[in-house]
């Protein structure tokens, strides 16, 4: 019986000691041409689904975080996006932050 309790305590201690955390990372995706602000993909917000993904990009106007939620989808061989600021377009060289987000996620 003593061995059983010792084994249970050891197993319990090992379970508590394990590190199951995921790394959250803000990936630099370049500068928004309209505002000149640098956008950072919040990697912990990436949610892939069939045909696209959602994510959040953060920028820091006046040093405070400003979050932009995105939805990307594939249509006719090109990626398109819409965001919480009301912008939507095809991903291209004219949308550098969105292009970098797609490259990182895909």
Image (cartoon, rainbow, N blue to C red):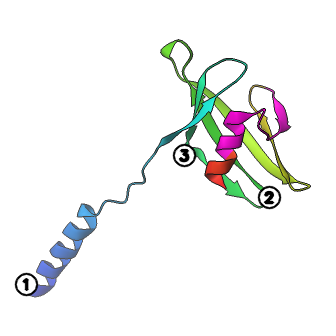
Q: Is residue 1 visible?
A: no
- Per the image, is 91 magenta? yes
The answer to whether the residues at label 1 and label 3 have Cβ atoms under 8 Å apart is: no
Residue at the image point whose x is 75% and y is 25% from the top: 85
Asked whether residue 10 is in view, the answer is: yes
User: Which residue is at 77% across, 61% downward?
Assistant: 50
Check disc 2 and report the residue beneath it: 51
Q: Indicate the position of residue 93 as horizontal and vertical percent values.
A: 76, 37
Residue 43 bears which disc, if any?
Answer: 3
Residue segment shown in magenta:
86-101
Does residue 21 appear to the left or right of 45 in the view shown? left
- Nearest the eye: 98 or 66: 98
Disc nearest the viewer among 1 and 2: 2
Give whichever of discs 1 and 3 has the lower sequence position: 1
Residue 65 is covered by the magenta coloring: no
Residue 65 image offset from top left, x and y in percent: 53, 23
| Residue at the (47%, 43%) spot, across then down | 25
Position of 33 with respect to 58 (left or right) is right
Is disc 3 placed on a helix, strand or loop? helix
- The residue under label 1 is 2
Around disc 3, counting alpha carbons within 10 Å, would you say few (fewer than 14), some (14 to 19), or many (20 or more)? some
Secondary structure under the numbered disc 2 in the rendered image:
loop
Camera-side residue of 74 and 47 = 74
Alpha-carbon span between mark 1 and mark 2: 56 Å
Tell me if mark 2 has few (under 14), some (14-19) or many (20+) residues whose alpha carbon lies within 10 angstroms of its own.
few
């Amino acid at each position: 019986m003593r061995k059983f309790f010792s084994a249970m305590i050891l197993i319990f201690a090992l379970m508590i000691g394990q590190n199951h955390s995921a790394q959250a990372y803000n990936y630099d995706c370049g500068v928004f041409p309209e505002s000149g602000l640098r956008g950072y993909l919040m990697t912990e917000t990436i949610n892939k689904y069939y045909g696209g993904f959602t994510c959040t990009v953060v920028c820091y106007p006046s040093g405070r975080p400003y979050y932009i939620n995105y939805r990307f989808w594939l249509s006719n061989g090109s990626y398109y996006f819409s965001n919480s600021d009301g912008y939507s377009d095809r991903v291209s060289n004219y949308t550098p932050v969105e292009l970098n987000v797609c490259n990182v996620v895909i």
